[in-house]
Image: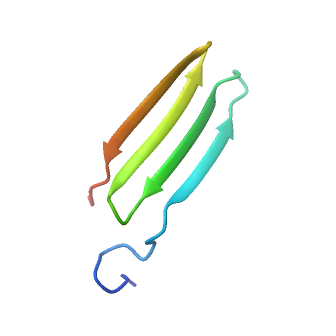
Amino acid sequence: MPASGGSSAFRRPAAIDAHEASGATVTHVEDFADATLYSNVSVNGHLYNLVGTIAEA
């Protein structure tokens, strides 16, 4: 059921941290209140910082 004042029941940021078998790492933060997604990915010694907008399908 949606929270009052928004369509998402999750209003706090959610974080995910993963270490892949290939050695890649991913840190992923979803800020539902601001509809923003932040990701940091390291692959083969390179660090990528990504920011995007969360939209309902």
Picture colour scheme: rainbow
Asked if residue 57 lies left or right of residue 20, the reply is left
Q: Quadrant of residue 50?
A: top left
Give the camera-side residue of 5 and 23: 5
Give above or below for 55 relative to 8: above
Total marks shown come to: 0
Picture residue at 60% right of the left edge, 49% below the top: 16
Image location of residue 7, percent across then percent down: 30, 75
Would residue 3 be found to the left or right of residue 43 on screen?
A: left
Where residue 22 appears, x then y in whole percent? 69, 21
Q: Quadrant of the C terminus?
A: bottom left
Residue sitting at x 27%, y 56%: 55
Residue 56: name its quadrant: bottom left
Residue located 54% across and 29% down the image: 41
Instruction: Please name whichever residue, 43 or 20, is drawn nearer the observer in this view of the structure.
Output: 43
Classify the position of the N terminus by image quarter.
Answer: bottom left
Which x, y percent locates residue 11? 43, 72
At which x and y percent is residue 20?
A: 68, 30
Who's the residue at 37% across and 73% down the image? 8
